[in-house]
Structures are given as structure tokens and as C-alpha cells.
Amino acid sequence: MLGWVDTLLQGVLLGGLYSLYATGLSVIFGIMRLVNLAHGDLIVLAAFLTLALAALGMPIVIALAIVVPLMFAGGYALQSVMLNRVLGRNILPPLLITFGLSIIIQNGLLETFSADTRFLNVGPLQGASLPLGGGIAIGVMPLICLVAAVAVILLLNAVFYRTGVGRAFRATSDDVEIARLMGINDKSIYALTMGIALAVCAVAGFFLGARANFDPSIGPARLLYAFEAVIIGGLGSLWGTLAGGIVVGLAQTIGAHVDPEWQILSGHVAFLIVLVIRPRGLFPRAVD
Amino acid sequence: MAVLETRELTACYGDFQALFGITFALDEGETVAIIGANGAGKSTFLKAITGLLPRQAAAVRLDGRDIGTLPAFEIVKLGVSLVPEGRRLFSSLSVEENLLVGAYGRRIDGPWSLATVYQLFPMLRDRRHAPSTALSGGQQQMVAIGRSLMSNPRILLCDELSLGLAPIVIRDIYAALADIKTRGTSVVLVEQDLVHAMSVADRAYCFMEGRVSLSGRPQDLTRDAIHAAYFGL
Amino acid sequence: MRIGGLTPAGHGTARALGSRFAVTRATRASTIVVLLAVPAIALLIALPAFASRVLLQELFYVFTMLALAQLWNLLAGCAGLISVGQQAFVGMGAYALFAFAVIAGLDPVLSIALSGAVAGVVAIPAALIVFRLRGAYFAIGTWVVAEVCRLILAQVKQLGGGTGTSLPPEVASSMVGLDFVRNLFAVRGPAARDILSYWLALILAVGTFMLVYRLLRSRHGLALSAIGDSEAAAESAGVDVFRTKLFIYAVTAVATGMVGALIFFQKARISPDAAFSLIDWTAYVIFIVVIGGIGTMEGPIIGVVIFYLLQYYLSALGSWYLILLGGLAIILMLFAPAGVWGLISRFYEVSLFPVRRRLIVPGSGGADEKEGKS
């Protein structure tokens, strides 16, 4: 019994991490109808950047504080220079550009950092746990990660629903042609969107590295978990993406509880099942 | 001097040419109607002016300045605002949010704000937080007009305001239009509803198959001439 | 891929409609190609008599990649079904062959076709699930399906689990056709197997080409083109979009499975990571199609040649080679999305493997031929 309670708790906490992976993807797709195949690799890149900065001697939190705006700028540049030129009805060019980017990032990281597994040292918080009574304890970093996931969603929703530029984002997502008539520069909006997504990736990368080991090759798997979380949650809703992340997390931990080799497979199977019985996801909002 | 003019404006949708050299002028404070059958190129004309369709550099002039190379989001900042055909409100935004988005490209000075738009269309104030898709056709048209007004345009381009609306609603819309005109806004009115269009216009153009087939002041145009220009018979 | 908008004429060349217009598909270039193809293929068949074993192995790689590229091109370039999960069928076909050999002792040569069928059977439920997604999300969905296949097969202990297994030697040394090859060319077992593999690869490459070509020239091809342009419009024109997509997806899966079975038959060794490799069976394949010219018959052929040369000269660079390929793909998409064949056909109106029908207006000689709109 205790084992199952622990499993469920771990699943929810893992879901927080997956939600962080998925939020950036959800935002990009919601506003631009674009899927970034390099998304997972960008999360891993952020983890490595944080690692490299921390290795220079600065506290890890400062490193994160530098990486977040750095990734934002990178996302803005990526969109402005490359992806804005190929956004349109044909999905192949952006797909292939981001696919090429994925391969470049993976191999670039491999050349720069080697294939060794790394982790981000968060000092005393490393491996710390919070006892909940009854013999159950949860990790402090995973808990902070879940809190961060919720905080990011609250922040983004505040931007999208309470600010003028947030209105511009939503208007562009609804009808880009008319948004232009309102004086909205859609290319700028898209660049900002990608910047935001990559900034969230930076946070996700931090928690990826703080919670577990990472190496240059694990990006694609993160993309798949993020994608599954978005689809399960339903397009158009960030809270839905959080729920989707938790579903994937729970599926994986339950599967692992039955047999450790089944962890990843369980997540994929849960995704396929949801796709069959609720193709629009659990909490769809957007009418695509 | 004309505040807005086009010279030999052509426009294409891919390989299909929709406009064949339109020459047009709008003076300050004027209301000009553009009439014509479906597919005559009226909406295309407005899209070309506002930058939604590619056009030549020297074909469109605002205050004597070429704006043919400017993208759409720049043109609205110069004071030209389009109320698009079919309303096309932002479906995930509320009524008030739609109006506020209209102010994104706002010129600094001008009479229009949320308060004055609600004065013009009082029923919108009661439904300000409703999703824009929940409104009736007539109310949506009011939101669309209000949204375009929020940028304080000097020139308001209206595409098929009366399309799909009941006569009583159309009357209210045109009453609001009269109010807008008193503030000195120049208006271009694309309409299939001849009666209303001709009753408010200072001048009119008739389009047929992408060309100007007739132009002049409504009182100078005979019914037969309009008929011939409209249908090409 | 566009097909001229006329009522479908019969196969083959010109057919007069009434007495005024003729509809034809053949071009002068295409007729030349057909005339050249026959001796070329004869040469390829006879190659083992005087070529080195290394050359045969290299050509094996070229033929199998060409087949995979043509199939991906059919799915993505013509039907608009952009899949990054075709490695699922490569792997399923390969594992089916090994399963037949290891568990049932079936002759591998004979079970290639059967392995393709297994891949086809897997494709149908996969399609039913994945067709619920659109566009880029469909692409990632196919990837998830491939991962599921990989993870499940890694659990099958009889086939080596996560580390894989080899083709049983008794099976490998007693295949159909092996004795014939051994005697004909006076070579030993492994060399004979290479020759056999080479011939099978040639058959598959040519066969895939014929399959794709015939499909595109049929009414299925017209339906595909329509779907690729606009599903809604195709549906309203009477095309059964779902059935057509399912048909193409399944047929491609069967053929891809057969190629996968052959590839790993030649390697004589399989593992989940190799059989379901994203890089080998999707990334390289997509690169081939895109650099050659997506949506054209000529594209994959050009692409595989370019790719082979890149691979031959640069793959020793390891990670830098992959970075180069990734960069090339990006530059291609930004500046030359129609690939090399796209660039060529922009300057020279030439069609080696024409699929479009053209209208010939009589009495105006060749100069007035009007091409269908592209």
C-alpha cells in the first residue's frame, strides 16, 4: 500500500518536470502552429550551459539567472533569422530545420562535453528529502520543480490574459491576418514566443540536471514526453499541459513500479490510449 | 489634395488577377462608396490598400506618400483602418479585449477610446466581458467597427458592413456611421446594399470584374447607368 | 506533386480524344531514359561476375537507401503524410525475418515478403491511432509508435532482448539460392550471401520504383495529389481521404518492412537500437529525399548519389559529419527547398519520369504543347 502511495507521489512530482518540458512546446504550438523538433535538445543544451557557467565558479542559481535570458535571446534569434522565413502552410521546412538543429545540438554537445553523464550540483538541496510522515518522503528538488512548473504557468497566463502584449499574442494566434490590421507585427510576436519557450526550456533544463543525470543524447526522449503531455492535456490550455505532464509521469512511475524496464513504454502506451479514447485530449480549449 | 489615392493599382491572388489598374481618390472628410457585384474586386481593393495583398510600390499613396511597400501593421499606424468583411473578431478574446487590441496600433491623438466607443454602441458595454463569438451578427459588427475606431484612424475602410444583417440592425450601424463621419473621419464604404451606400456617400465608384466601370456623385448617376456599370449589360 | 487537370487518359502514350486533342505522358527525355534503363539494369544484374565484394556491398547500401527514400517520398512528398517514424517498419520487418528464422526456421529469402506483410499488419492499427493527429503532431506520433515497437521488441528474450541476436548459422548457410550463387561464381558462403543480397536489393530498388511510379500514375496517385494539396477539397471532390491515406500508409509499410528485412538479413545481426534507429532509417532517408528533390521521381535517385558521396568521403568525421548534414538540411530548407532536381528543372523543363499528363494541341507542332499547371 505504502509503495503505491509513494509511486503516485513520485508520479505527480515527475509530472511537474514533464510539465516544464511541455509548457514551451505548448506555447509555440498554440501561437504559431509550429512544432520544434529540437525542443528536447534545447532543454539539454540549457542544462549544459548552466553546468558550464557553474563550473566557472559562480553559484548555480546565478548561472540559471544568466542562462534564462540567454536562451530567450537565442530563441528570439532562431525565430527571426530562420523559422520566420519558412512559416506557412507547408509544415516540412520548419520541421526539417528544427530536425537539423536537433542533430547539430546533440552532436555539438557531444563534441564539446563528451558523452559522459553529468548532473547539476545544487548544494545541500542535492538529494534532500522531506518526510511526510508514515514512512513516506518526497525529494525537495522534485517538489521545488513542481512548484516551479505551476509558477511558470501562472506567470505565462498572467502575461497572456492580463497584459496588452498578451492580448496581441492571443489575437495573432486567432487570426494573424486581422492581427496585422491591428498594428501587430506577427513576426515579432513569433520571435517573442520562441524566446519565451526557450526561456522556459532553460528552467526545465535546470531541473532536469538537478533531479537526474544528463548527457547529450537524451534530448529526443524529452521531446517525446513533452509532446505526449501536450496532446494528453489538450491543445490550447497550459493547465491542461500540466495535467498531461502528470498523467505521463504517473503512467511512467506506475509502469516502473510493476517492472522497471517498463517505465518509458508505459508512458507511451498511456499516450496512445488517450489518443484513441479522447483524441482532443483531456482539457482541450483551442479550436484548431 | 486627395488624402488617399491609388494609381493603376493591380492585384493578384497567385496566378489570378483580381484588379486591372484601379485609379481612385479620397479627399479629406469625404465618404466614398464602392459598389459592384460579388467578385468585382471591391474587397480585394481594400486589402491591397491596407497591405494584406502584395502591390506595387507607387500604386497607393497616403497624403502624397507612397505606402505600397509598407507591411499591414505599419499602415494602420498611419491612420488607415479596415473593418474587414465578415467581422472577423478574435474568437478567443472577449468584446472588451477585441476593442483593446484595436488600440495596439493607435495614433496618439484622437477622439476614440473605450468610453467613447461604448457611447457609440451602448449595448456593447453590457456585454463587454462576453466572448466575442457569443454576440449576434449585428453586435459583432459593432465590435468590429469599434475595434477599428480604437486606433483613431483618419481613414476608415468598411467592407460589407451590412452583409447578413437584418434591416433594422443595418439602420443602427449606419446611424453610428453618421456619428463617425461628424468627427471628420474619411470613409470608404464597400457595399452591396446600394440604397444605404448611395444615401451616405459623397461620391461613388462602381467596380466590375476588377475595373472601375463608373464613378461620380450619387445624384449625378442615373439608375440605368448604375445598372449597366454594375452588371455590365 | 501536381498532375495536370484533365480527365484521366489511359496508361501509356498518346490517345486521341475525338479527333482534336491528344493526351500524353511521355516526353522526349523520358523516352531516352526508358531506352537506357534496360541495358543499365542488365549491366547491374551481371555485375557480380566482375565486381569486387566491397563494390557489391556499397551498391547494396545505395539500393536499399534508394528504396527507403522512394517510399518516404511517396508518403511525404506526394501524400503529405510526413512521417518521422518509418524506422518502425524497418525494424518490424527486420525482426519478423529474424523471428521467422530463429523461431520457425524459415528460409530468410522466402520470408522477406512475409516480413513485409508483418510490417503491414502492424501499420494498420498504428495508422488508426496516429491518423487522429495532424501535421507536425502526426510526425511525432509516428515516432512514438516506432519507440513503442522498439521498447516492446527489446523485451523479447527469444530475439536477444536489448542486446539483440544473430542469424542462426544453419539458417544463414542453407538459404534458397545460395548454392546456385556459390556454384555460379565459385565463391564461399559469406561472399555468396553478399551477391544474393545484392540481387535482392536490386530487385527491391527497381520494384519499389515501379510500385511508386505505377501508383502515382494511377487514380490513387491523383487522389494522393489532391489530398496533399487540401484534404477538405479532396473529400468534397469524392476522394475517400481516410481509405486512400490508410492504403498508402499500409503499402509503404509493407515495402519498407521488406527492405528492412533485407537490410538486416545482409547484416546477419540485429538489435533494437540498430533496427529502429531514427538516424539511419529516417534522418538519412529524409536528407536523401530533400536534397534530391521532394515530391519528384528523380529526386531520390539524385539524392542517394549525393548522400553516398558525402557518406563515403566525410563520415569519418564522426559528429562533425552529422553536424554538417544537419546544417546542409537547414540551408536547403531556407534557400533551395525543392532540392537539386528542383533547381535543375527550374532551368530546364525536363521530366525523366513523367507523371503529369500533357495536352497536345494538334496542328501546332511541338512548340505549342501546353503543360498541365504545376
Image (cartoon, coloured by chain):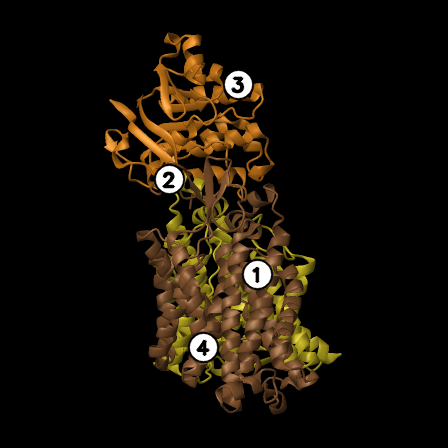
Chain colours: A yellow, B orange, C brown
Nearer to us of marks 3 and 4 is 4
A280 sits to left or right of B140? right
Mark 3 nearby-residue class (10 Å; few <14, some 14–19, many ≥20): some
- Contact (CB < 8 A) between labels 3 and 4? no
Question: Circle 2 — which element?
Answer: helix
Q: Can residue A59 be seen in this snapshot?
A: no
Q: Nearer the viewer, residue B151 or C65?
A: C65
**Distance Cα–Cα, label 1 vs label 3:** 47 Å
Question: Circle 3 — which element?
Answer: helix
User: Which residue position holds label 2?
Assistant: B105
User: Which residue position holds label 1?
Assistant: A230
| Residue type at tag 3 | Arg
Q: Nearer the viewer, residue B45 or A30?
A: B45
What residue do we see at 49% from left, 40% from top?
A: C16
| Residue type at tag 2 | Gly
| Residue type at tag 1 | Val
| Residue type at tag 4 | Ala
